[in-house]
Amino acid sequence: MIILGIETSCDETAAAVVRGIGDRVEVLSNAVSSQIEIHKKYGGVVPEVAAREHVLNIMPVVNQALEKAGVNPLNPPLQGGRVLNPPFEGGAGGLDAIAVTVGPGLVTSLLVGVETAKTLAYAWDVPTVAVNHIEGHIYANFIGRNSKSEILNSKQIQNPKSKIKNKIQFPALILTVSGGHTMLVLMKGHGKYKVLGETRDDAAGEAFDKAAQLLQLGYPGGPAIAKWAEKINPLKPPFKRGVRVVTLPRPMINSNDFDFSFSGLKTALLYAIQKDRDWKLRIPEYAAEFQAAAVEVLVHKTIKAALKYNCKNIMLSGGVAANLELRRQLEQAVKNKLSGANLSIPEFKYCTDNAAMIATAGYFRARRKKFTPWRKLKADCNLELK
């Protein structure tokens, strides 16, 4: 089955083509037009600017994805209303379906992708699949795997092409961490989700952006914080003989639920640097402490939820999943505290917003005949995962 995925939930205009055979998904193309440089001068995404850029880039990106995949959408593999696998010899063939992000996200951005998918579905006479953006991040873990996940050790985390794999087992627990979302999701099977906890205010990625802004490190904040944190010298302040002198709180780490809160962490950073006349000389230390606080809370709550629900597989997803420190600590915690559980982490290129993950989620929905008529596709900026 050949699926075209379209993703425009925020500031990335993306299109991808995947081929699904059984439980295996192969990415044939993955095109992304980034707007980071455009929004960098504003310190964050400007919705109106993002939407205008999507309008300009959406069809060139779609055409690029189709061309690279060798797909001819004018030769749809539809016969008698039944979706068939296209011929694989001599090219990918036509399209079986178009999967598109319908929410959550910026409504003006979502509309560009949704209206494009509706138009193409009508013109090419192919069915459409509505995909939740969070579900897309979850299915980034299934790309290129025969329903298998990678067990990553510290060295393998540095090498996203690791081939060590084990079969995914349900129930699985997914920690989704991005600029707009931080949540723990229990996955009992394909399309079967239960949200166990989510952020009550800022998402982790948003908190990283604001922390980087306070430290004058630029945008996007996550990579900037991580880069400066690597420069820390444990022999200098805020460390003294290996003991941390300056600390930031770990919000809600001991709460009786699985919710998160990161706005207080950002405020604590603000107060700390306001009291420190020399904070600009110690940016690496502040960056490292902020990252350490956020990662510790994320990992602690993930392990706690996995133990309670006896999860066989732990998945990490979302843009913040590219953070190496989060990967290292989660890997170590799963190894030490979850006997027999496997850890799955997507390749770096599938952590941030992309259309390959949307197409993959669309494929698994299409397998279950979960199509949405193009006339009923609707952008929903507050769409819930269910």
Image: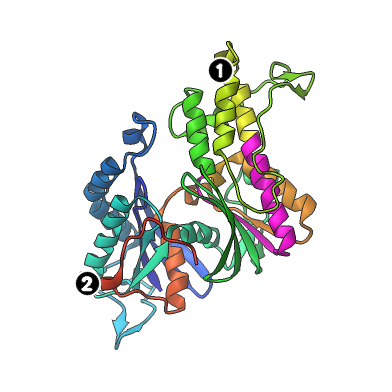
Image spot of residue 12 (x, y percent): 36, 47
Magenta span: chief secondary structure: helix
**Direction from residue 325 to residue 115 in the image, left or right:** left
Give the crowd class for mark 2: few <14, some 14-19, many >=20 residues within 10 Å: some
- Secondary structure at numbered mark 2: helix
Instruction: Please indicate, yes or no, whether residue 144 appears anywhere in the rendered image.
Output: no
Residue at x 26%, y 43% (from the top left corner): 48
Instruction: Please indicate, yes or no, whether residue 44 appears anywhere in the rendered image.
Output: yes
Magenta residue span: 293-319
Q: Residue furthest top?
A: 277
Q: Circle 1 is placed at which residue position?
A: 274
Residue at x 70%, y 16% (from the top left corner): 236
Above/below status of 290 relative to 64: above
- Secondary structure at numbered mark 1: helix
301 inside magenta stretch: yes
Q: What is the tally of numbered marks visible in this picture? A: 2
**Direction from residue 225 to residue 133 in the image, left or right:** left
Question: What's the amino acid at mark 2?
Answer: Tyr
